[in-house]
Image (cartoon, rainbow, N blue to C red):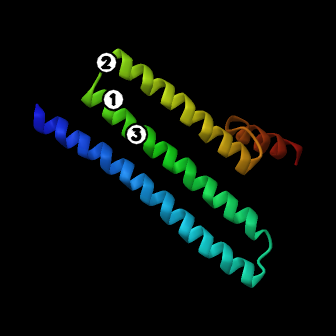
Amino acid sequence: MEPIKLFTEWCATAIEVATVIVIVLAVAAGTARFLLHLIQKVPNAFEQYRVRLGQMLILSLELLVAADIIRTVVLEPTLANASVLGLLVVIRTFLSWSLSVEIEGEWPWNAGRQTETEARAK
């Protein structure tokens, strides 16, 4: 059973490292693109930059949740660890929703309703 736990720990750690890489590359690439857009005087350059960074942060939060689930469920499935996992998932979900509202200007569950309402009005 030890090789499976070791492999699982490596997988969870690899996902966390991938998350850091995603964040660093997203900030670097996004900033370079933003500076290029500023030089080219692209309209809404800052808004595009902010949206792309927000999307990458949402992706990174989801990756971190995946790593935590793997680590908790496979490696240490105790009630205390499950409680900590639940709290982390709630916090990261709240952060993800907050970023989504900041990017799109509406709650994620309202996005489809406005589209239906707009379609009916036309």
Residue located 29% across and 22% down the image: 77
- Above/below status of 47 relative to 71: below
Q: Quadrant of residue 31?
A: bottom right
- Residue 63 percent location from the top left of the image: 44, 45
Residue at image coords 49%, 62%: 24
Image quarter of residue 36:
bottom right
Q: Measured from the top left, where is residue 62 in percent x and y?
A: 48, 43
Cα distance, mark 1 to mark 3? 10 Å
Q: Residue at x 44, y 55 (%)?
A: 20
Within 10 Å of disc 3 (Cα), the crowding (few <14, some 14-19, many 20+) is some
The residue beneath circle 3 is: 66
Residue type, mark 3 in image: Ala
Q: Quadrant of the N terminus?
A: top left
Distance of label 1 from label 2 (alpha carbons)? 8 Å
Residue 78's tag is 2
Q: Residues within 10 Å of mark 1 (few under 14, many from 20)?
A: many
CA–CA distance between discs 3 and 2? 17 Å
Name the side, left or right, on which 74 lies relative to 79: left
Between disc 3 and disc 2, the foreground one is: 2
Assess whether mark 2 and mark 3 are in contact (beta carbons under 8 angstroms).
no
